[in-house]
Amino acid sequence: MSPSAFSPLIATAQSQHFAAPLALRSGASLADYQLRFETYGTLNPARSNAVLVCHALNASHHVAGRYADQPDEVGWWDTMVGPGKPLDTNRFFVIGVNNLGSCFGSTGPMHTNPASGHPWGADFPVVTVEDWVNAQARLLDALGIDTLAAVMGGSLGGMQALSWTLQHPERVRHALVIASAPNLTAENIAFNEVARRAIVTDPDFHGGHFYRHGVVPKRGLRIARMVGHITYLSDDVMNEKFGRELRHGLDLRYTTQDIEFQIESYLRHQGDKFAEYFDANTYLLITRALDYFDPARDFGGDLTAALAAAQAKFLLVSFSTDWRFSPARSRELVRALVRGRHPVSYAEIDAPHGHDAFLLEDLRYLNVVRATFEGITT
């Protein structure tokens, strides 16, 4: 059965243009930009049932459903969003937005810089989680939505959901922060830097202006994806799926460059696929936004003080084998919220899948989210 058989929603991508400059956290600004987005379900007359879904590093506005002319292009969180699903589009009006700087329709490095007439490339301004949230708020204004019933996201999307409760606390009633953290550890920043160096040292990168040369730094993108993909999986999953299985049966080929093990073949496949559709400059921008996110920084490292402005009710979910965004980081957030007397629920799911678990169909996890949305009045 094809993936489209599980997706009754027909998705339609839309774009919203913004002429007014958006002030960025770096001190720069961006004018004449567009945001690509999709909506699912129906906005009720009170405009009180809207849920914003924030995407992670390599995802997009295509959260759920399928396109009529591309039935196999199923949304990245189709297990979560749709009729009768945990985030039920029979009750809620769901919005997925592609972030600025991405490569899936919103203005980013691949688009033309009006000042030069060439693609932005490396000249595209650095964007942060906070900038994305402010851009999303402008889109909600354009859609006539003052208050969100909920904002939710996993991984980097969870950081955006958290940031929403701090930047626009009066506009968020519930926040679902899944497989996320209040900031990156040094190890996480290190992984991001290795991936970025793989890209910028690719001879085809040309200082970020490779578009003008008609090339793509695919070698760097492949390595970046391979490094990242390792961190999304648990050791248990890799051992169960691949173990030490050789690609050519029982025979060793005694080579240092060709593929010997199935795990190598898998990683190269993932890298090759990623390099065909993802933009190198976008990868640099988004991983740097991950690095920068740290709401406690402006409060001397005091996370409880940083969260004081929040007015939302929180659900936090973590997964036992997620070592990229470990349960300890979610518990850190929970403790800070409890100290600040914010309403918070927490679920720690014992799952073998690593960081990718937040994208998978684990009934315990999905039922926790379902119960949260069933408790939200619209």
Image (tube, rainbow, N blue to C red):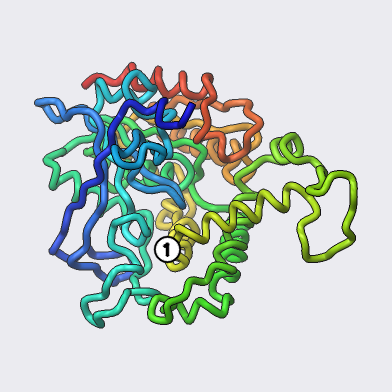
- The residue tagged 1 is 282
Residue at x 19%, y 44% (from the top left corner): 140
Residue at x 62%, y 65% (from the top left corner): 194
Where is residue 112? Give x, y as percent: 27, 73
- Left/right of residue 121 with respect to residue 269 in the rendered view: left
Indicate whether 218 appears above or below 359: below
Q: In which quarter of the image is the C terminus?
A: top left
Quadrant in the rendering for residue 81: top left
Q: What element carries label 1?
A: helix
Where is residue 173? Give x, y as percent: 27, 31
Where is residue 170? Give x, y as percent: 22, 38
- Left/right of residue 71 with respect to residue 240 in the rendered view: left
Quadrant in the rendering for residue 176: top left
Indicate whether 262 appears above or below 338: below
Density class for disc 1 (Cα within 10 Å; few <14, some 14-19, many ≥20) is: many
Indicate whether 78 appears above or below 265: above
Q: Which of 158 and 233 is in front in this view?
A: 233
Residue at x 47%, y 75% (from the top left corner): 215
Q: How many marks?
A: 1
Residue at x 85%, y 63% (from the top left corner): 255
Q: Nearer the viewer, residue 219 or 144?
A: 219
Quadrant in the rendering for residue 8: top left
Q: Type of residue at label 1?
A: Thr
Where is residue 325? Give x, y as percent: 57, 43
